[in-house]
Amino acid sequence: MPLESSFDKKKCIKESNYSLKDMHLKIRNWIIWILLFLLISSAGLCIVFWFTNFFNYSIISNLKLKNGTLSFEWWQRPKVHAVYRVRLFNYTNVDDFEAEKVSKLYVEEVGPYIYREYLTRVNPEIGLDGTITYQEMRSYHWESGHSDHEVITVPNIPLFTAMAFSRDMSFLTQVSLTAILSTIQAKAFIKVSAGDFLWGYDDELFRIAKPVIEWQQNIPYEKFGMLAFKTGLSNDRITINSGVHNLRNIGNIIRVNGKSTRNIWHNKSCDKIEGSDGSIFPPKILQNYGDVIKVYAKEMCRPISLEYSHTNHSKGIPVLRYTLSENVFISNSTYNSCFCQKHVNANEQAAPTCSPEGIFNNSLCHYGAPMLSSFPHFFKANEKLLTHIKGLKPKKEQHSTYIDLHPRLGVPIGGWSRIQLNLEVRKADAVPFIGHIKDGTVLPILWIEVGINKIPKSAMNILYHAYYTLNAVETCLQIGSLTGLLIITVSLFIILYKH
């Protein structure tokens, strides 16, 4: 009996040992499977956070312009208001020039006249195809700088425009225009306050011509002013990509007034409507610095390209600086030839006439007025443009155009767009109202700096956190996933090595 009891006791101990081993084996196997699961998960997270844009995409997906979202609300009523710094060219020796005491007109830059722009996007229509169609409502308020009550001497734009229209008309029409100009005592240069010249002043010739011009195209302002077309509700209905279906195209203009092409330059590529309106750029484009970004300039009826320059800092945030190509205003037989003006010659064939280097002829976008665009002070333009004008001093650091973009969100947080408007003299044989100014002379009128100099604190906090905070979170997730992968790999190796 004692022998049997001892045997049973040994048997129980042996069976108990076997049970513990089985339990340990099961626990070990469970740990191995759990570690394998965690290993695969950690490897997946490493791939996601280190080799994909998943994190970044999850952030910028909030930029989609969907009704009811913060991004849509800020798009409709932007919190950041652009500043306009306008500088006018005052012609100081007109009397001496008309008396032939001097051979060149002298201009003096006056200003800046600083205005704050207030923009609202109204009457939005959200399409099922991921588009938004809207109109723009703009107003401008003088903020600082020179008083726009200053009186200056400037070219009589309506007169020069009438001359340009009449030069291709019949001799009888030109004589009739001469009679009208004599009646209203039109002069080549006028004295007017800076504010009126910009936003609207009473002009007898404009009042007479407006009903005639409106037979072909609508003029949405009652008084003539260089920037009068920008105020109030725009007649244009703009269609952009909302980014709902594809963030790569967010903010890009697709159509203007329902048309994807302007039919102005008679060239499919140059007439195409494309590019951003300048308020937001597709964030994914910024990931490849080699890509150019495009802005559609409505006042020039063409897209313009900006190229990556370098990384900079703006308002304490690292930014990507893009600059406007210095050859953007060059049109010749080999470069941008489709932007050269086309005329019909005696053989009824299109004979393109290209503007001097550094000047872009955008008269087709200004109701036929002989207006040309350039960099301020004819920077990077043909030196012959300075032949008849004195007082211009082009400087790259003051007269070039650049934009600073948030590297993650693709929104501008700095930069200046600088464009000069000029008037081309086009004489008509039977309309002797321009005096001694030579045909083809380009008269500088004004140049404008448009930029961002103030950002509200609420918007600045978002921009700041979208860079520094999210970069820190992304870095923690990357390091955490890699650290977890290493710890799990080592733990799994130790367990397998021991057993």
Image (tube, rainbow, N blue to C red):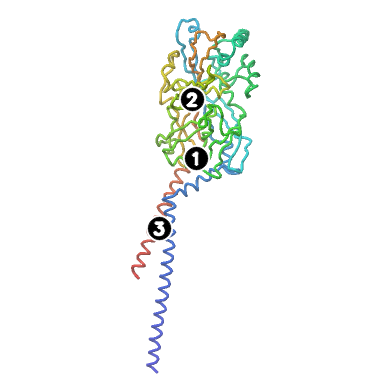
Residue 484 position in % (x across, y down) = 40, 58
Query: Which of the 4 image quarters holds residue 396?
Result: top left
Residue furthest out toward the front: 347
> Judging from the image, what secondary structure is the residue with disc 1 in?
loop
Q: Specify the quadrant that holds the N terminus.
A: bottom left
**Do the residues under discs 2 and 3 have CB atoms within 8 angstroms?**
no
> Tag 2: residue type?
Ile
> Tag 3: residue type?
Gly
> Judging from the image, what secondary structure is the residue with disc 3 in?
helix
Tell me the crowding category of disc 1: few under 14, some 14 to 19, or many 20 or more residues within 10 angstroms, Cα based: many
The residue wearing badge 2 is: 419
Q: Earlier in the sequence, mark 2 or mark 3?
A: 2
**Do the residues under discs 1 and 2 have CB atoms within 8 angstroms?**
no
In depth, the one of 122 and 82 nearer the eye is: 122
Q: Earlier in the sequence, mark 3 or mark 1?
A: 1
Spatial separation of the CA atoms under disc 1 and disc 2:
24 Å
